[in-house]
Amino acid sequence: MVTNNKTNSKVVIIGTGMVGMSFAYSLLNQGTAKELVLIDINKERAIGEAMDLNHGMSFAPRKMKIYAGEYSDCEGADIVVITAGVPQKDGETRINLLNRNAAIMKIVVGQVMKNNFDGIILVASNPVDILTYVAWKASGLPPSKVIGSGTSLDTARLRFEIAQKINISVKNIHAYIMGEHGDSEFVCWSQAYVGAKPLIEIIETMKEIEFKDLEEIHNSVKNAAYEIIKRKKATYYGIGMTLVSITSAILNDENRIIPISVYNDGIYDTEKDLYIGLPAVLNASGVNHIMKLKLNNKELEQLDESATILKNILNQMDI
């Protein structure tokens, strides 16, 4: 069971699709919050999901109040997690899809903020870096209180792949995916560690892994979502548990380092005024600070390329 420092922790999920409900199910199983509100444009679905979760309460690690609610229930919430969005139509351009989802995000965040919300907004809707920026602009909150899931799931996938390769517990793998949550994301290999030992040194001493394997691992991580979608049409368990990890870090005031989509105000010398995946220290206030890593020249170029792609997209949108 997760130890929660707050006496009355309240989480609101907006969007009861597969991602939202995988998150809700993980919250219930890990006992992360004391109150969980489900909001969806289809109120009947939200009611049904709440009923289904409540019927498993006998087996949960702690009592939780779970119910279908309205935007008025955002008042007093610690975290609002947004998973809502629309899929791409046949023949629709990426920018048109982005503009449609951005319009939805503005409406959702506007409704949240109308109800005296002063907590933290966590965006999981894709493309997460772009939509987190939209949510921040629409909220009027400081950037430390508006975050996206960013490269947190990608990083979990990376650590799993490394752990499988060298047969060391994933909990002892310390490595990050940075940049856009998308095709331009990159691995910060220069700062990858197994326990306290640099991965580069591990490669020199272990026969299980070679330098040529690093690119294979990166491609496997980058293409993971495509491979899952090809087989089961969507991904949701991994991101559901990832969102619980982020939520726990906030509710428990953990000062935990998680690579999330955060506002870049110049900590790295690249495009500014955008959200991008960087390791950040999370606590009850949101982003305490971004942990600046000593990137090598190649990694700095990769970060700059990723930031430029995101900035170009933002410049094409109706924000």
Image (spheres, rainbow, N blue to C red):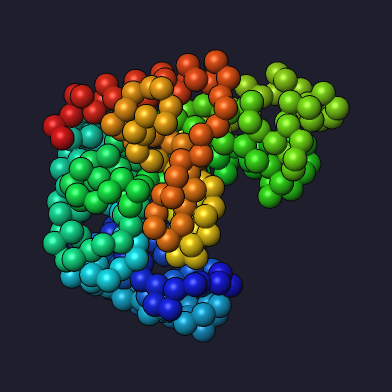
Residue placed most toward the observer, 50 or 296: 296
Relative height, residue 169 to residue 207 (above, below): below
Image location (x, y in percent) of residue 120: 33, 57
Residue 69 vs residue 160: left or right?
left
Image location (x, y in percent) of residue 264: 36, 34
Residue placed most toward the observer, 237 or 243: 243
Residue placed most toward the observer, 283 or 152: 283
Relative height, residue 168 to residue 203 (above, below): below
Relative height, residue 230 to residue 31 (above, below): above
Q: Residue at x 42, y 61 (%)?
A: 284
Q: Residue at x 39, y 61 (%)?
A: 21
Q: Residue at x 37, y 45 (%)?
A: 148
Image location (x, y in percent) of residue 43: 21, 68
Q: Quadrant of the N terminus?
A: bottom right
Relative height, residue 84 to residue 251 (above, below): above
Residue 15 vs residue 319: left or right?
right
Residue placed most toward the observer, 33 or 207: 33
Q: Quadrant of the C terminus?
A: top left
Image location (x, y in percent) of residue 231: 50, 40
